Image (spheres, rainbow, N blue to C red):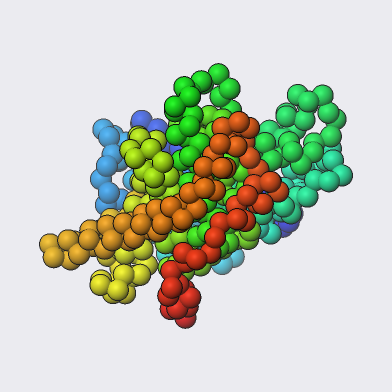
Amino acid sequence: MAKAVAGEAGVPFFSISGSEFVELFVGTGAARVRDLFEQAKKKAPCIIFIDELDAVGKSRSGGNGFMGGNDEREQTLNQLLTEMDGFGAGDATVIVLAATNRPETLDAALLRPGRFDRQVLVDRPDLIGRLAILEIYAKKVKLGEKVDLKAMATRTPGFAGADLANLVNEAALLAARRGSKVVESEDFAEAIERVVAGLEKKTRVLNEKEKKIVAYHEVGHALVGAKMSGNEQIEKISIVPRGMAALGYTLQVPTEDRFLLNEQELRGQIATLLGGRAAEEIIFGSITTGASNDLQRATDLAEQMVTSYGMSQVLGPLAYDKGQQNNFLGGMNARRVVSDQTAQAIDQEVKDIVETAHQQALEILTSNRQLLEMISEQLLETEVIEGDSLRQLLGQVDDQHLLPNSEEKAVAAIPA
Ligand code: ZN
């Protein structure tokens, strides 16, 4: 993006990575900074771009350096600050851009007015962004007539630019393997699954009993999902093992990008996650280790509902986690210091939410037991069910087990 800005402005462009400044010998980095700015001033107006700014710009109070490294980094940082202040009004313009994945670790001095005082968050692209990115990469391959890039963009929420590039690349490879010169929609569909779930492992053989459990488990997810999560559609159920851990999987794709989820939708997601385990309980009367990842995700969601979104009646609209101030991009949030009583109440609420969702999943599957068995048997034969035949099967889930007050709750949970 910095390069694009330089291109738009029609000025020279200097690029360096922050890690190149940091050397074992004290003073080297500072000298490099001086050199860089001297060169840039000769070519001004121009743009300097520093990648991985956090390598030099870490907060000086952090004190997590190794022998010599800390001194060196501090000197380099001081030099950078001095250079950035050094542009007088009469000087030709040098604009400094920098990128980092860890803005929260940067030294406060770097962010003051006159230095890096404007920040642009480059987030994962939304639907329109993904479509634009796909269009760029798709120009490099020959697309079949039926390929709908908009549909691909819709099916890839959360994909970053590099994932989308990888997706087009995978699809092109698959087409080449088929001996086709054009990339068709089925290549894209398979490529999405590869990126999301990993490669198919046709050699991993499950025994009959395991296969049966996996089939019922996945159909459990699908049935509860069909019923509970409004804007997500079950696209595919498969018991062909993929990737690192998945023995089978249920592919659920959103019908649109969502930025706000209400309480009811979150509860639906939790119930869907528990659908697999619930199916195992109902059919086999016992549970396997296969559901541990589901439980992890369900519990995380429930905890967020209580501690971040204020969705608990008991605990009220308070944020019990410290938000993302310590960790700007990803990572776990730390919990605020609370009394023992509150901590207990939080644990109880999280447990209640998960348990309620579990009961819901059990109810849905019990009242649709015939359907559960029918689809699972079919899945055991075909290994994959998708598309229209799946929608037709899932369309038979009965509607009598929606929570009686679900409408009311959904309305109440939408933030004003
Ligand atoms: Zn599962």
Residue 144 appears left or right of 262: right
Name the foreground residue: 72 vs 241. 241
Residue 247: image location, x then y, percent: 48, 31
- In the image, 366 versus 54, the foreground residue is 366
Residue 182 figure quarter? top right
Q: Which of 182 and 387 is in front in this view?
A: 387
Residue 35, above or below 116: above
Determine the residue positioned at 74% across, 38% down: 186
Q: How many marks?
A: 0
Residue 161 lies left or right of residue 259; in this view the side is: right
Q: Which residue is drawn at 52% across and 51% down?
A: 223
**Relative horizontal placement of residue 104, taking residue 183 as reference (left or right):** left
Q: Position of residue 199 (x, y in %)?
A: 58, 29
* Residue 182 in sight here: yes
Q: Which of 21 and 367 is in front in this view?
A: 367
**Which residue occupies the extreme left position in the image?**
340
Residue 234 vs 373, above or below: the answer is below
Q: Is residue 188 above or below residue 262?
A: above
Rendered location of residue 191, percent (x, y)? 66, 36
Evaluate whether residue 222 shows in this view. Answer: no
Q: Which residue is drawn at 74% across and 54% down?
A: 150
Q: In this view, does 96 lie to the left or right of 64?
A: right
Kindly identify the residue that appears in the image at 52 percent across and 42 percent down.
373
Percent x, y for residue 277? Answer: 39, 44
The image quarter containing residue 175 is top right
